[in-house]
Amino acid sequence: MAGKTLYDKLWEAHVVREEPDGSTLLYIDRHLVHEVTSPQAFEGLRLAGRKPWRGDSVLAVPDHNVPTADRDKGIADPVSRTQVETLETNVTSLGLKFFPMADVRQGIVHVIGPEQGATLPGMTVVCGDSHTSTHGALGALAFGIGTSEVEHVLATQCLWQKKTKAMQIRVEGELRPGVTAKDVVLAIIGRIGTAGGTGYAIEFAGSAIQSLSLEGRMSICNMSIEAGARAGMVAVDEKTIEYVRGKPQAPSGELFDKAAEYWRTLVSDPDAEFDAVVEMDAAEIAPQVSWGTSPEMVAPIDGRVPDPAAESDPVRAEGMKRALEYMDLQPNTPMTEIRPDKVFIGSCTNSRIEDLRAAAEVVKGRKKADNIKLALVVPGSGLVKQQAEQEGLDRIFLDAGFEWREPGCSMCLAMNADRLEPGERCASTSNRNFEGRQGQGGRTHLVSPALAAAAAVAGHFVEPSALKEA
Amino acid sequence: MQAFTVHKGIVAPLDRSNVDTDAIIPKQYLKSVKRTGFGPNAFDDWRYLDPGEPGMDSSQRRINPDFVLNQAPFDQASMLLARKNFGCGSSREHAVWALTDFGFRAVIAPSFADIFFSNSCKNGLLPVVLAEDEVQALFEQVEANPGAQVEVSLEEMTVAAPDGTVFRFTLDEDRRHRLLNGLDDIALTLQYADDIRAYEERQRSEWPWMAEHSQG
Ligand code: SF4
């Protein structure tokens, strides 16, 4: 009999009940909650006279609507304010753990989960948010759910699920200098497409993935959903265990050692069989820039905008044409000639300390280009912000003419005041380049923090190594 | 949840693949704390020419005459036909609420994004997966004959095209049962409360750090 995949192990450890047709009641260890997808769930619970099954599994935080400037003035938009206040009322009335906007631990839900040790290896983690896959970087089974499921987890601590197929994406070899986790995941999506992982749980493996820090692994797992997969994960190794050690909600002392012993088993067995395997050569991955309105529409920085006329599949060609029209780009334009108006460094993909360091390294001693109207740096959490300030990164950004803001989702989806105006083009470290995602009519190019920073100082896309000496 | 057994109605052809949930309901409307009222803003960026904000009276806005849902008889459609990977992107269930609030009972496409698929089953919106050539055939028929009625039966798991062709689809038995009967998921799950408690007992002995330290 073949060995077990990491996914098999995580799944089997959480089965409460299995029906003959394979429908499985799966136990949920951690339930992360934010203000946008939870109000209707709490209302449903209340209307049915139900209580949370295990309140201590919840960690709630406002992140999507929060302002990133002038926090002391509160939230100006009354609709946003109501939503954030509704979250606060809902969770405090039930005694659930909550980091309000003024708490230094507040931040994007997918940044604070691992940061607090609220997400641990071996857990099942859910949140009413598709980027919950991020937490899989710790060797957890983490996936996004809808609001009805949020209510279901609150009420029962479980979800009905069917086991999906398992895909392994192996990236072997050494990444070229300047190529980051973000480039790897964009290249993967470019290769398998936005539906390539639909119906699968993806395990990212191979020496290039193992060489990444936990932050890098989080950037990769974060975008599993952009490849169509609800869950992405990376096997536990010593880096994972060291990452978790000492985190506020992690076990300590003997219990930690006992846990670590178990966590070390959270790897796919050598003879495990996957339903699909994708292999990639790390050395072939270049820094990526997206050119269209779907995350699979990417090109290497030294490449060009593709030509729909060269596409044989008519449905695809039509999609490309529509995307280029929306993005206002001509086929065959070199990527390095594209000039953004704004730059956004942040989001649950790339707002951790390592991301800010990478961006600051490029920015150091340089200035924002004149054509860049705004270069926004939004740390993923209050603690990331604090750490960055201790390292002096805020000064580097401010001296270069960037803005240094308070933590939140910000211009990743523009539910707060940070957004693109119609027609504006943005180099963004976020994860979605859909039409209007960063503001109606806005045009998004997905890139790594280093590339976003380089675009901000050069005024066009460019490899950081090609910038003039600072 | 509204049960789904058989439904007959007009199908609107939305000839796009990768229709994402940001397009189905743009973010500014996610600020609502209710489940209802999203219908007028379904496909807001495509449907209207002026930018929309919550609280606006949609009947006063400039509509985009080129968008299919603004064209008779598709403004009366109760089913949507689209290309592959429908509902990709954000997990927002508001996308499903916007479609049901508009009046849709079913979406027919060659494939759906996983979270959207699960969300729609929980709200009585039937996601129907047909083969690409079957979807193509439906596109051709409804475009040639816009008011024609299509009948979707979850009981039989069939789609009857205007020309009488019958296409078959499948849905897993569990979801089908819940949809056919409009069942409340939570009440069903709570029948297994003892199993859940037994699992928690096991977790406490095998993985004692899981719950004990969760209070931080
Ligand atoms: S940063 Fe963006 S993608 Fe991440 S949770 Fe917030 S809105 Fe969603």
Image (cartoon, coloured by chain):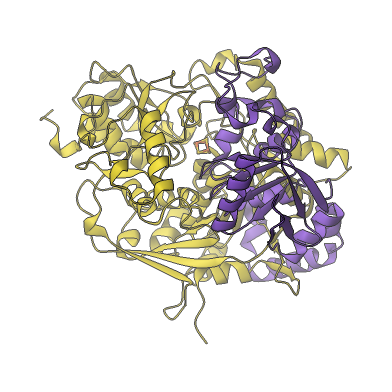
In x, y percent, where is residue B26? 58, 29
Judge by depth and name the residue closer to the eye, B137 or A401. Answer: B137
Chain letter for the yellow part: A
In x, y percent, where is residue B150? 73, 48
Image point (84%, 51%), residue name: B184
Chain B tint as drawn: purple
Judge by depth and name the residue closer to the eye, B12 or A80. Answer: B12
Whether residue A370 sits left or right of residue B145 in the image: it is left
Residue A309, above or below B209: above
Q: Quadrant of the C terminus of chain A?
A: top left
Count of picture labels: 0
Q: For residue A11, which quarter of the picture?
A: bottom right
Q: For residue B207, which quarter of the picture?
A: bottom right
Residue A45, above or below A341: below
Image point (38%, 44%), residue name: A317
**Which residue reaches farthest left?**
A469
